[in-house]
Structure formats: C-alpha cells, structure tokens
Amino acid sequence: MAFTQLTSKMVRADVAPGQVVFSQRGAMLAYTGQVTFTPSITGGQGGLGSMLGRRIAHEAVPLMTVEGHGAVMFGHGGHHAHVVDLSGETLYVESDRLLAFEGSLEQGTMFMGSQGGVMGVIRGQVTGQGLFTTTLTGYGSVAVLAHGGVFELPVTPQAAVHVDPQAYVAHRGDLRNRLSTAVGWREMVGRGSGESFQLELSGSGTVYVQASEEKL
Amino acid sequence: MSQGFGPPPPGFGPPQYPPGAGGPVVHDAHTLPADDNVNPYTFSVHLDGQWFLQRGKMIAYYGQIDFHGLGHGPLDRLVASSFHSPLHAAQWVVAQGRGRMLLADRAFDINSYDLDQGNLTIRSGNLLAFSPGLALKQSIIPGFLTLIGTGKFVAASNGAVVFVEPPIRVDPQALVGWADCPSPCHHYDHSYLRGVLGGVRMLTGLGGLSGEEHQFEFAGAGQVLLQSSETLMDGIDTGSVPWEPGMPGGPEGMAGGGRGPGGRGPLPF
C-alpha cells in the first residue's frame, strides 16, 4: 500500500505519476522529489454535485490534491495518525479526522439517519459526528487522525463491542451501530457514572478507538 | 546518532517499555540508564563533571550535583569555552558534580544525539542539554542554535524525530534541525496560482490556499531532522546579534530592505 507509518504521528505516502493523494490542507510535513500541492476546490472527489453535497452535509474539509513523483510525509497538529488499508470495504470516518487518503478510494457522504433512523441522528449528535459522516470505499490507504493512540477492535457476530462515543474514531466493514443508553434516576440527580451513553457495534468488521475522550 | 533511520518499531502510542515489563519500572541510582532514555519522555544523564542544561528541565537527580546559573561563579572559564553567543547565556544552567540526572520537558519526546567532530543546527526551544565537549553558537538563521564539536546533546521534539536525507523540502513547522548540510533556502510553490484563474484565486482567496506554498529546501549531503507534527515548542531567546554592516537582515531583522546605501538596511538611529 502506498502509505507507511513512520512514527505514531507521521505517515509517509509514496506518490507516483497517475496516482492522486488527497490530504488535509497544511498537513504536509516534508517531501522529496517533484510533488505539487493544489488546493481542491471541490474538497475531494467528484464534481460540483459532490462538493455541494459535502458542503450541505458539513463534511467538507479543506483538502488538497497531491500529485507528482516522490514521497510526502504527513502529520497534523501533534495528533496521532493511523493508517488503514482498505481492500474493497467501506470506512466510515468523520471528514475532519481524515489526514490523507488515496485517490483510488471512492469518497461519499452518508446520512446518519440511514443507519437506524431517528436513533441514528441522535447517535450522530452524541458522538459529535453530526448528521452526516464520510465514507471511503475501494482499494487504497487512509490515514486517520486521532487524539491519543489508536487501537483496532475486531467485531464479530458473536462479540459485539461497546465504545465510548467520544473515543470512537472510525469503523469499517459491515457493522451496525446502536446507541445504548443507561440513563436512570442516578443520572437525573447528577450522580451518574459518566458512562450512560455507549456505542454498540455489532456485525463483522473493525472499529477504531482512540485512547482519549478528547475530540480533535 | 543514537536513533536509526526509517520507521521505528511498530506499535502505537509512544510509551514502549522494555519487553517483559509488566508495569511501571522502578529505578534506583544504579539501575537508571547511563546517558540513555528511561522512557520516551525522560533522559538520564550519567554526570561526572559538567553538563549544560536549559533552565528548568531537570526533574530529578541522584548524587551530589550543584546547579549554577551562568554569568557568575566559578565556572566562567568553562562558560567562555562553550558559549559563543552574546546574550542568551542567561537561559542556561551548569550542572556540576557526580550522579544521575533526569531531564524532561512537558512530556515531549526526548532523544539524545552523539556528535563526533560534527555540527548540528537545532531549533532553540528543542535543545534541552549538552555536554561540555560541544560548543553552542548562534546560527545565522534566527531562532536556531548550532552545536559544534564532539559530545552528546539531548533534544525534545513533539513526536519522535525522523531523519531524512536531502534533497528534501520541509514544512517550516516540522523542522527540528539539520546536521552536516548547508543551511536551507526558501522554496516557494505557487504553480497552481498561474494564469488568470490563478491570479483571481490569489487575489480573492477563492478556493483557498493549500497551506504548502512555502517550504525550506535542503540540498547537499547530511541529515535533516523532522518532528512529526506541526506544533512548535516555545523557542528560547537565542540572543540578538549586534548589528553591523554585512550582517544578514537589518537591525530590525528585516531582510535587505531599508534606505541605507547598498541595501544595508536603515541607518542605525
């Protein structure tokens, strides 16, 4: 794959002619070879329609197109970076967590309500994802930003995984997620455990969790 | 160099305890490493003689160690041989004695580097400490310090340091320092701002900028040290240089400009 994890906070992307890498603007740390950085007006792939879709969905982050021949190192804001290699699956991730991704991946926007209706919308509010999230499908690498280190938890049909919504980073595969609440009288009187909302992921796939409850 | 090239060992999150360690490692005066890292954030100096350290970076020590501020006291001769900058000496402290001294800086990653008849230029805020075999000088690049000689120094960085070899172009914020290669020059990349559309874009800001229009370019043989984030550490005062004709920059630190003859900058006073 074209992305290499150099340190826990730095990712190297090899760029070759004909291959495009999209990255967050200003996230380049260094590069060798002949590489150009062009701000992507449409904020990623697709034409004007895709751009409008992303703008409306608030999933439009300033992206730039990286082209040429060489190697580029990416990192941003002292956050941890984590490389996810996709081989045909779909990665669901918030757009502002995207450090860089290969142009071979298909970028899309998904309405949270399409996974669980109203509860999906509420889930989006609790996790800070909002009403929409970004999807990346196909074959290629993605570098995802997180506060604190990232670890992967496999999800199998036998073993569902519960994640703190604030520590949730991304997930991939065929996963259904559900917000489970445990709000009782203790929460009402302000004596809650602080863990009353949890994200339950079931199905088969992988969920990426950051070792921090801080948002980016 | 005590750190190799290329990707570090796999694993996420910086704290990597020695294999087999199942929890916090308890050290005493004899098990503390000599001139090596205790963990990614702490460095242990085996002190027998003197070391120079930035004020406030010592967190603990074993043994008999005295700390002297610079500028007075019995160490004037040593100071004169190791410091060559006019003003910033007050930022430094001499540790003198025998023992183990622990250095750390706000949980930034700490690394040590060995120089053997070499030179290395580093961003001023990143340098924590160095042994007296090295001479500390101001770089002609403002905000950077140059170490020359043979010895060991300790530097902090935001995220582990990655070594790369020129030719390379580096984001100014990601640059920690460079060794053995000539000073960098500026590189501007406005290729997408060409033409009429580019002009409109530059004037109106429509479409935004990539944020990567400006880099430091390194050429020649040597090594460039990168930190893996764009968060800078606070710089320390490297001191100002008394201005004289021929100095890079003017008395105000502005390059070239000024009304003096021959572009020497504004006339002083």
Image (cartoon, coloured by chain):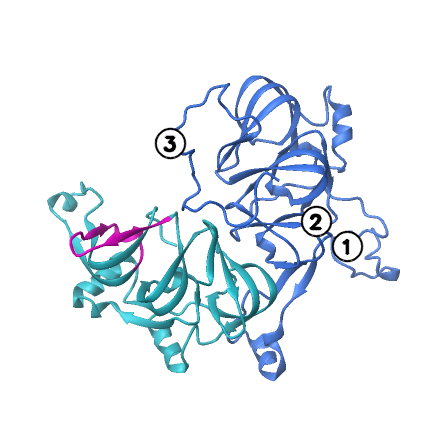
Residue found 72% across the figure and 42% down from its top = B119
- Asked if the residue under mark 2 is in contact with the one under mark 3, i.e. CB atoms within 8 Å, the reply is no
Nearer-N-terminus badge (3/2): 3
Q: What kind of element bears circle 1?
A: loop
Pinpoint the chain carrying mark 2: B
In the rendered image of this protein, which colour is used for chain B? blue
Look at label 3 and name its amino acid.
Answer: Gly
Look at label 2 and name its amino acid.
Answer: Pro
Q: What kind of element bears circle 3?
A: loop
Question: The chain shown in cyan is which?
Answer: A
Q: Residue A155: within the magenta? A: yes
Residue found 59% across the figure and 79% down from its top = B198
Q: Position of residue A212 (x, y in %)?
A: 34, 46
Pinpoint the chain carrying mark 3: B
How many numbered dots are placed on residues in this image? 3
Asked if badges 1 and 3 are on one and the same chain, I answer yes
Gap between marks 2 and 1 measured at Cα: 10 Å
Seen as rendered, the residue at the extreme left is A185
Residue A84: assigned label: none
Residue B20: assigned label: 3
Foreground: B36 or B257?
B36
Nearer-N-terminus badge (2/1): 2
Residue B142: assigned label: 2
> Which span of residues is magenta-colored?
A150-171
